[in-house]
Amino acid sequence: MLKISSLKKLVTDSMAIDLGTASTIIAVKGRGVVLDEPSLVAINETTEEIVAYGQEAADMAGREGRDVVVKAPLIGGVVADFERTKKMLAHFVKKAKTGGSNISIQAVMSLVSDVTHVEQRALLNAADDAGIGKVYMMEEGLAAAFGAGVLPTDKRASAIVDIGAGTTNIAIVAKGSVVQSTSERYGGNEINESLATHLRRHRGLQVGEETTELLKTKFSSAYLPDDISRSMEVRGRDVQTGSPAAVEVTAGEMYAIVEAIVRRIAIRVKDTLTELRPEVAADIYDRGVILTGGGALLEGIDQYMRSFINLAVTVADEPRYATVNGLVKMFDDQKLLERVTLNELSVLQNAEI
């Protein structure tokens, strides 16, 4: 016979939410990742109603009906459209709950390091509206570090570069806290935009987001490819005639575009590493840098970083899930959770939206 207390443990969902520009990933304590969907909503422009969320909305993108538009309510890791972010989060949380239970849940969410109080308040409100009883918030870099295997008890420093779609976070972590961090509001999306611009301007071809994402993940590389003449056919719409068309692109041509964006991230990493205290710098020299986030999956990015910063660079296991895995670990140690969260509630309650 189950005791009431252990039964309660079964139904109180402790949820980790990584609400990102491109994807929302939710993990539940004891169950791992339960939701991984694009951070998108499909809106009927006539009625302003949301007709689809997440993957279902993504499947409509680029092929929407006449009065449907697909939008990303978060830009650069920040709430750009509050009402829709709120509805999207509520939808995802409901989907992730065990057996549709309505029992009060607690959640821990990640934030970029330079988030403003107003932005933080917007996320807290959204979580509140989604029916989450207690919300903890912690810095993304710290969560990614824990998810990548850095131990909160480790007194030596580790460097984490979390490359998302809309943000790049660089965090130096020691003894379970962030020693130094910097965050840039650009990431993998910049590569997609550059690829699309190049095709439009130089090859006269207009392509959709699905095509650029495919081009980035399946064909592009951050490191000079061995065979720069390797080619791929890209289909889209001819800019001048408007007719369906296709062009051949080469690996060398794509590399030049991708490298320009990756270089910006690498320069930022290098600059951050020059600002460290000697002991911390010594630790990083020994340990190198860990890459997390979806951007870490870009072909050759670890090799590129390695040659740029002259340090060891490794990609975390399941880099896209590093942040959410780090967040969900927090529920195993309530003291640590209380210590690392950024809930300065008094400040937040006074931050007007």
Image (spheres, helix red, strand yellow):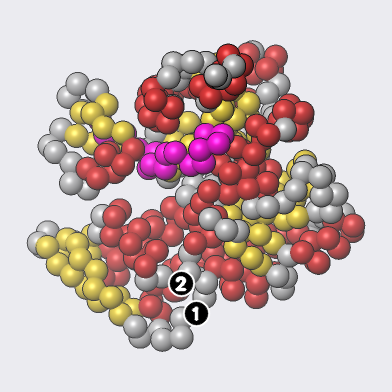
Q: Is residue 36 magenta?
A: yes
Q: Which residues are magenta?
A: 28-43
Q: Residue at x 55, y 19 (%)?
A: 1
147 over 88 or under it: above or below: below
* Circle 1 Cα neighbour tier, 10 Å, few/some/many (<14 / 14–19 / ≥20): some
Q: Is residue 80 left or right of residue 332?
A: left
> Which quadrant holds residue 38?
top left
Q: Is residue 148 left or right of residue 248?
A: right
Q: Residue furthest right?
A: 279
Check residue 221 in the rendering and tell me which mark sits there, or answer none: 2
What is the three-letter code of the residue carrying label 2? Ser
Can residue 218 be seen? yes
Task: Give x and y (percent) for residue 171.
Answer: 70, 49
* Prevalent SS, magenta region: strand
> What element does badge 1 sit on?
loop
Label 1–label 2 contact, CB within 8 A: yes
153 over 242 or under it: above or below: above
92 over 229 or under it: above or below: above
194 over 36 or under it: above or below: below
Task: Give x and y (percent) for residue 308.
Answer: 65, 72
What is the three-letter code of the residue carrying label 1? Leu
Q: Is residue 9 magenta?
A: no
Can residue 201 be seen? no
Check residue 224 in the rendering and tell me which mark sits there, or answer none: 1
Total marks shown come to 2
> Which quadrant holds residue 40?
top left
